């Protein structure tokens, strides 16, 4: 009886969680122009979407910003994690970590507004450059947080062994440290990518007039009312996120399996 | 020699800390002391604390964020608890996280459709005999949608806290004759409180600043601190006042963080 109640509750929560998303996707196949009555199946809105040159350009922009910013953020963040890990004083490390987390806990509006002041004071024009820099900036801390735990797991004995065997600093980094922390680096890259694709508020503040990303475009179209092209877009994006989640899950599973195998070999 | 070389690796990260963490915070505080004609003044703060409109807006924003957080906890705690008892719980947890990967604006847009005059919600109300209501552009709809969006961010930390809970405590409590409710009240809930606190941090602060939802769903009926900041920065171009409200928001954030801060040194498993 109790179990039934629990299961009913869970089913209800899952229905609530997914209903709006399914609702959007169902209406992307409706022949009408509103989200009120279903009018029969059509691919029309997807056709409109894939011939909408403005929308396609914005999708390309969004992907470019996301990939480029995550790549740069991953490099800077990994170097940052390496430097934080090298600090010996507890106080230094703690204050570095606190500073690192400032952008993680700050509300989006604060980040957006303060970056806007920053760019304006330095006379940096708003557009692709400012959006790219902002995305790199708010992605770095999550990369650091993903890489640091792997660095902590690394045993000092391994590094000493490599050094005793004559490895230079460079070799130590490329042959020992980087391969060991690579799962953390990949996870950081993935998280950075999703942060970038998901961001609206910060981009909205620093984007200016000429440049737009998907979130900003959806916002301005949604303010004008219902347009089933957006539903088609959400269908495509849902599929895309499924693939991303699947990819992330697969990478985690693979790394866990590798860990297990290594343990079996060791024992 | 190694010391000198590794020092170089820290430069990009250090630059980032200086330019994009310290400088922006300093700039927003600096900007809050300038009025519209760029004079150094504290008038923004005096205006803020003397104006009934600003104070009411702030109180209202905090109250709405409190309600959103409360509803999120009430829905998420049982969900996390029941989920934790399931067989393939990691898989189900992934299904909870999946909606967070859908762009927040698309979810808001879905509710514009659901809550519209002839939308799904009103069709349902008509069906059960209440008749269509104005749902969109009300405070209630804003709270509903914000709660919907925040639920996964609350479930996740509570679920992790339940995962960290040593089942031996529960068994011991049961062996000592505690009822199911007593075990929950005295053992499970206190030990998962850190998860709830982490959830509050993840939900309350963003709820103070969700300006896109107030625009799309709240129809300017609800004005949160975030909406006010966006308005001052991008519409009325009064950056000084916008920054002042920003400083207030930062202070609010610090208060919430201290109140819900983890006293992990007292106990809990070290990681």
Image: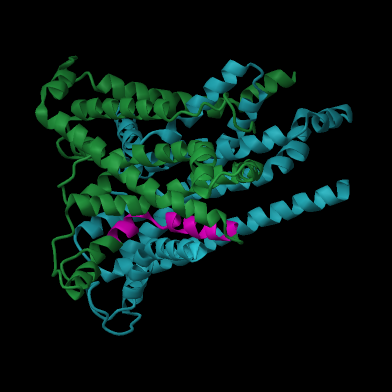
Chain colours: A cyan, B green
Please determine whether, in this image, residue B180 is positioned above or below residue A28: above
Q: State the image coordinates of residue B122 (x, y, percent, origin top left).
A: 19, 68
- Residue B106 is covered by the magenta coloring: yes
Please determine whether, in this image, residue B53 is positioned above or below residue B152: above
> What type of secondary structure mainly makes up the magenta span?
helix
In the rendered image, which quarter is residue B37 located in? top left
Tell whether A218 sits left or right of A103: left
Q: State the image coordinates of residue A154 (x, y, percent, origin top left).
A: 74, 35
Residue A200 visible within the image: no
Q: Nearer the viewer, residue B89 or A133?
A: B89
Tell whether A98 sits left or right of A124: right
Q: Nearer the viewer, residue A234 or B7?
A: A234
Question: Could you tell me which residue is drawn at 46 percent across and 49 percent down?
Answer: B155
Count of marks overlaid on the render: 0
In the rendered image, the residue lying farthest to the bottom is A40
Residue B229 visible within the image: yes
Q: State the image coordinates of residue B34 (x, y, percent, origin top left).
A: 20, 20
- Residue B60 is covered by the magenta coloring: no
Question: Could you tell me which residue is drawn at 48 percent across and 41 percent down?
Answer: B185
Tell whether B262 sits left or right of B200: right
Q: Nearer the viewer, residue A246 or B11?
A: A246
Question: Could you tell me which residue is drawn at 46 percent across and 23 percent down?
Answer: B18
Question: Could you tell me which residue is drawn at 59 percent across and 40 percent down?
Answer: A146
Tell whether A255 sits left or right of B57: right
Q: State the image coordinates of residue B15 (x, y, percent, origin top left).
A: 50, 26
Instruction: Find the magenta span and give its range.
Output: B89-109
Please determine whether, in this image, residue A165 is positioned above or below residue B150: above
Q: Nearer the viewer, residue A58 or B155?
A: B155
């Amino acid at each position: 009886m109790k179990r039934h109640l629990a299961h009913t509750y869970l089913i209800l929560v899952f229905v609530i969680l997914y209903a709006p998303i399914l609702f959007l996707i169902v209406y992307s196949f409706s022949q009408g122009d509103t989200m009120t009555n279903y009018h029969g199946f059509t691919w029309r809105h997807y056709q409109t979407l894939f011939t909408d040159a403005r929308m396609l350009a914005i999708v390309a922009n969004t992907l470019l910003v996301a990939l480029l910013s995550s790549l740069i953020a991953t490099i800077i963040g990994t170097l940052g994690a390496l430097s934080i890990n090298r600090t010996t004083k507890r106080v230094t490390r703690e204050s570095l970590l606190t500073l690192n987390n400032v952008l993680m806990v700050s509300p989006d509006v604060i980040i957006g507004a303060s970056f806007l002041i920053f760019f304006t004071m330095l006379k940096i024009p708003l557009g692709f450059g400012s959006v790219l820099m902002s995305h790199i900036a708010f992605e770095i801390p999550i990369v650091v947080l993903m890489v640091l735990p792997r660095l902590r797991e690394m045993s000092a004995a391994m590094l000493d062994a490599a050094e005793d065997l004559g490895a230079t600093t460079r070799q130590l980094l490329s042959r020992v440290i980087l391969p060991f922390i690579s799962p953390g680096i990949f996870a950081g890259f993935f998280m950075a990518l999703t942060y970038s694709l998901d961001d609206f508020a910060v981009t909205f503040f620093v984007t200016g007039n000429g440049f737009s990303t998907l979130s900003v475009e959806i916002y301005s179209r949604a303010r004008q009312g219902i347009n089933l092209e957006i539903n088609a877009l959400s269908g495509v994006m849902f599929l895309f996120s499924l693939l991303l989640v699947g990819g992330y899950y697969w990478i985690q599973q693979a790394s866990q399996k590798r860990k297990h195998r290594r343990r079996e070999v060791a024992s | 020699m190694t010391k000198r070389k590794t020092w170089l690796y820290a430069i990009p990260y250090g630059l980032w800390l200086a330019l994009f963490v310290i400088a922006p915070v300093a700039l927003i505080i600096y900007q809050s002391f300038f009025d519209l004609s760029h004079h150094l003044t504290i008038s923004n703060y005096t205006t803020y604390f003397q104006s009934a409109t600003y104070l009411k807006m702030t109180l209202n924003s905090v109250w709405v964020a409190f309600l959103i957080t409360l509803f999120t906890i009430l829905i998420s705690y049982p969900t996390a608890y029941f989920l934790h008892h399931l067989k393939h719980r990691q898989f189900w947890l992934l299904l909870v996280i999946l909606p967070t990967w859908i762009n927040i604006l698309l979810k808001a847009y879905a509710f514009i459709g659901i809550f519209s005059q002839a939308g799904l919600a009103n069709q349902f109300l008509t069906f059960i005999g209440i008749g269509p209501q104005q749902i969109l552009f009300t405070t209630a709809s804003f709270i509903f949608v914000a709660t919907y969006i925040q639920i996964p961010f609350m479930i996740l930390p509570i679920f992790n806290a339940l995962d960290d809970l040593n089942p031996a405590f529960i068994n011991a409590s049961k062996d000592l004759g505690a009822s199911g409710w007593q075990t929950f009240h005295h053992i499970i809930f206190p030990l998962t409180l850190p998860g709830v606190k982490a959830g509050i941090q993840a939900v309350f602060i963003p709820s103070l600043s969700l300006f896109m939802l107030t625009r799309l769903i709240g129809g300017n009926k609800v004005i949160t601190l975030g909406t006010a900041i966006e308005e001052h920065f991008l519409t009325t171009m009064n950056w000084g006042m916008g920054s002042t409200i920003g400083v207030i928001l930062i202070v609010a954030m610090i208060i919430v963080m201290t109140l819900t801060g983890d006293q992990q040194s007292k106990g809990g498993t070290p990681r």
